[in-house]
Image (cartoon, rainbow, N blue to C red):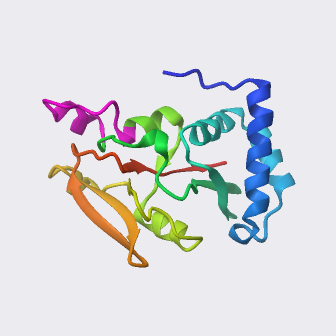
């Protein structure tokens, strides 16, 4: 497992990347300003590490909302396709351990936990899709209700034919074009 600390140089570079992305997509957060976001980020070093991991694995995180009740900014992976550094994984540890042959290296739930982020829910995934067109060639595992998971299944989403689809698969399955998108509240 990686250390959950980033260097000063990594932090400064990440903040520059996040500010540039924030400014490129002002329509995603019209009523927010970068100075407020950055101030909050600097107060939460452990969250900066999680954002660094999101960026390092290809997620291109950006602010997509602000929760007034909790006073938290909501970041999501906004890469056009599911993050490259999080593909070819099954859904969770139980699914990973159930595979007898050709086990993937990791699972979506384990990776998200290690990174300090959450898999998107179906509602969050659909909300993300209102900001643009994501996963036109890939798909992303999403949080799966316990009653589906208990029967061996897991859910994933993608966008095809200008529609967002929710599908099911065995939780132990994995594909080169399926990964997961995460969210982080700060």
Q: Residue at x 77, y 36 (%)?
A: 13
Above or below 150: residue 156:
below
- Left or right of 184, for residue 150: left
Is residue 161 shown in magenta?
A: no
Q: Residue at x 13, y 30 (%)?
A: 100
**Stretch of the chain drawn in magenta:** 92-109
Give residue 11's quadrant in the image. top right
- Left or right of 180, for residue 63: right
Q: Residue at x 56, y 48 (%)?
A: 59
**Residue 126 drawn at (x, y percent):** 47, 70
**Residue 15 drawn at (x, y percent):** 78, 42
**Residue 71 drawn at (x, y percent):** 71, 57
The one of 168 and 45 positioned closer to us in this rendering: 168
The one of 13 and 49 positioned closer to us in this rendering: 13
The one of 152 and 129 positioned closer to us in this rendering: 129
Above or below 123: residue 82:
above
């Amino acid at each position: 497992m990686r250390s959950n600390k980033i260097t000063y140089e990594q932090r400064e570079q990440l903040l520059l990347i996040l500010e540039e992305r924030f400014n490129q997509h002002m329509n995603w957060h019209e009523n927010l300003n970068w100075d407020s976001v950055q101030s909050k980020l600097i107060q939460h070093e452990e969250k900066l590490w999680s954002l660094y991991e999101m960026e390092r694995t290809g997620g291109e995180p950006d602010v997509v909302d602000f929760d007034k009740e909790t006073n938290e900014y909501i970041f999501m992976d906004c890469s056009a396709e599911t993050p490259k550094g999080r593909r070819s994984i099954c859904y969770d540890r139980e699914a990973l351990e159930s595979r007898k042959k050709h086990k993937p290296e990791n699972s979506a739930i384990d990776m998200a936990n290690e990174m300090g982020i959450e898999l998107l829910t179906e509602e969050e995934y659909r909300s993300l899709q209102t900001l643009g067109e994501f996963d036109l060639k890939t798909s992303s595992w999403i949080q799966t209700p316990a009653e589906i998971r208990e029967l061996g299944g897991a859910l994933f989403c993608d966008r095809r034919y200008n529609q967002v689809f929710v599908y099911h698969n065995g939780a132990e399955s994995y594909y080169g074009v399926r990964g997961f998108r995460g969210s982080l509240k700060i």
